[in-house]
Amino acid sequence: MMMKKLFLLCCFFAVTLTTNANGWINFQVNYNNPNPIGTGRQRTPIQPPAVYLEDYTLTFSAFEEDCVIKLLDEGEVVYEVDIPAGSTSVILPSTLSGEYTLQLFKGNWVFSGEIEL
């Protein structure tokens, strides 16, 4: 019985990993301090935005301020777009394919996550 549960759990993770092209993006949070003098960083942690990728469409709750999204391939920017405040989605170019680092710049905060197109 235990082996059967372990087998099913392994199958679940294998399916989850292979369908990673669509889904919620897990972000790492960094603070970009333009003025290195002083404390710079807020003391309260910031919640990363909830961004969902489906095919080439990024969907999210409307941001209160303008943001910038960049796609990086091995550190090189391959796509960049400004997101006006109030927008809830962005369509990425369908000519892109492969694994990319998605960076979302919101004020002095930088949210980085890995995506596959």
Image: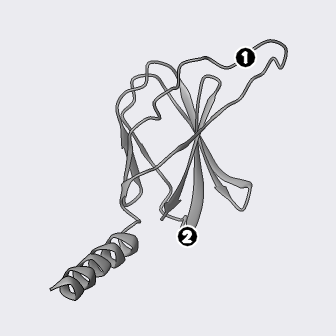
Image spot of residue 41 (x, y percent): 67, 20
* Residue shown at the point (49%, 26%) measured from the top left: 84
37 displayed left or right of 14: right
Residue sitting at the far right: 37
Mark earlier in primary sequence (2, 1): 1
Q: Which mark is residue 40?
A: 1
* Residue shown at the point (85%, 14%) measured from the top left: 37
User: Disc 2 versus disc 1: distance between alpha carbons?
Assistant: 36 Å
Residue sitting at the far top: 38
User: Quadrant of the rendered structure where residue 21 is?
Assistant: bottom left
Neighbor class of circle 1 (other Cα within 10 Å; few <14, some 14-19, many 20+) is few
Q: Quadrant of the N terminus?
A: bottom left
Residue sitting at the far left: 1
Q: Which mark is residue 112?
A: none
117 displayed left or right of 112: left
Q: Nearer the viewer, residue 4 or 34?
A: 4
Q: Nearer the viewer, residue 111 or 69?
A: 111
Image spot of residue 83 (x, y percent): 51, 32
Q: Nearer the viewer, mark 2 or mark 1?
A: 1
Does residue 88 sit above or below 57 in this rendering?
A: above
User: Quadrant of the rendered structure where residue 19 is?
Assistant: bottom left
* Residue shown at the point (55%, 29%) measured from the top left: 67
The residue to which callout 2 is attached is: 98
Q: Secondary structure at mark 1?
A: loop
Image spot of residue 74 (x, y percent): 72, 62
Image spot of residue 104 (x, y percent): 56, 38
> What's under tag 2, amino acid-wise?
Gly
3 displayed left or right of 33: left
Q: Secondary structure at mark 2?
A: loop
